[in-house]
Image (tube, helix red, strand yellow):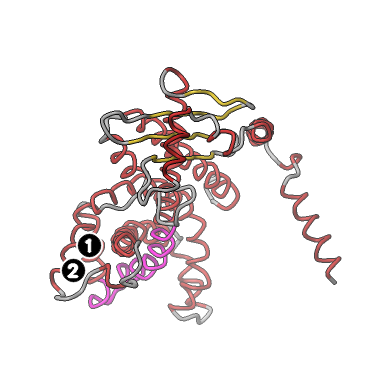
Amino acid sequence: MKTSKISDFFRWLVSVFDVRKWERKSRIIAIVLVALFVVATAFAFVKPSEEELMDSASQQIRTELKKDETRSRRQVAITYNDLYFINYGSFSTSGVKGISEKYVGFAGSVHKADDGAWNVVGQFINYTYRMLGCGQSMLYGAKLTILLTTISIVCGLFIAIFLALGKISKNPLISLPCRAYIFFFRGTPLMIQIFCIYLAIPGIFEGFSWRSLFDSNDPEGVFKGAFVAAAIAFILNSAAYCAEIVRAAVESIDKGQYEAAKALGMSYGQTMSKIIIPQSARRMIPPVCNEFVMMIKDASLVFVIGLMDITTISKTISASGSYLVFIPALVIYLIITAFFTYVFGKIEKKFSVYE
């Protein structure tokens, strides 16, 4: 039984990577990505280790590090960032005679990065590492952006189905509240909605705070509370926009489908769940995918409540005068958007009726 499952898994894996099934464009993209991965892996094998990078420090830094072993408070700040095929390390001391040294490890060599091109490379590594949230919890950088967007669209789409069906209902007690909800969230700025949920709700309910939802000893409690508030705002906003997508898809189904279902004796609920919604789902794919991509970019608004997403981290770093940070921020957003656009393009082509 176990052998059969393993063989089935490998057959599935081979079918996934069977280039004969891919289009020419997809094959070229796959070849380029594999080639880049192979090259990056080759560089990763010859990349200097963390110890080698740290050993490159000057005698002054080594002396201070030795003294730190007996001090109650360290005087040398050490940074180490590892991005698979390249790494970066820096040492800095405070005071009037402060020392700052930076190094980049690449292709088997350690390069001094205090100025020049290697300094720019070192900054890019440091910024990218921090924005991706490497070595940190889920609520950081790119991981926060992707997590928040996914939760918002999935939950928002679920709510949107009921809102859309409620809006097209002939019962005014159901349709009017749904119409009002959609009008409100589509007619007000998302940033104001975030402020209202994050700031106004604790103001209305005395003693409540988003931070109180988590353990008082949790050092990340403030950020987790802000994430919950942001997620609620994004879900409610996404539900309103997705509701219009669902409504348009449902109303695009030919009226003859309803009449045929009625002739077969099917109830309204059976008609919607077994005939209309399954057909509508195919028509929802392109606009929902577009909404997902738009939400990725809208997620940058969480900087207004201090959440450490890509935008917030970039803005924080730029406060020190390092404006180069916005370049890797743009690249990271572009990569994330390009990846999901490509994936959704494949989904649309496979399932959408617009072929």
The local secondary structure at tag 2 comes to helix
Q: Where is residue 18 in the image (x, y as percent from the top left)?
A: 76, 44
Q: Nearer the viewer, residue 254 or 155?
A: 155
- Whether residue 148 appears in magenta in the rendering, the answer is no
Magenta-highlighted residues: 150-175
Answer above or below: position of 249 versus 303: below
Q: What residue type is labelled 2?
A: Ile
267 horizontally vs 156: left or right: right
Q: Residue 277, relative to residue 289: is it above or below?
A: below
Residue at 45% in and 60% down: 253
Residue 198 numbered tag: 1
Instruction: Specify the label residue 44 is tagged with.
Output: none
Choose between 208 and 302: the one closer to the eye. 208
Query: Seen from this angle, which residue lies furthest top?
Result: 116
Measured from the top left, where is residue 203 in percent x and y?
13, 69
Quick check: is 156 in the magenta stretch?
A: yes
Q: Can residue 87 be seen in this view?
A: yes
The residue positioned 76% from the left and 40% from the top of the image is: 20
Disc 2 crowd rating (10 Å Cα; few below 14, some 14-19, many 20+) is some
Distance (Cα) linking label 2 and label 1: 6 Å
Residue that carries the numbered disc 2 in the rendered image:
201
The image quadrant of residue 52 is top right
Residue 35 appearing in the image: no
Q: Which amino acid does label 1 sit on?
A: Tyr
Secondary structure found at label 1: helix
Do tag 2 and tag 1 residues touch (Cβ < 8 Å)? yes
Q: In this view, does 42 lie to the left or right of 279?
A: right
**Picture quadrant where residue 148 is located:** bottom left
Question: In which quadrant of the rendered image does the N terminus lie?
Answer: bottom right
Magenta part, dominant SS:
helix
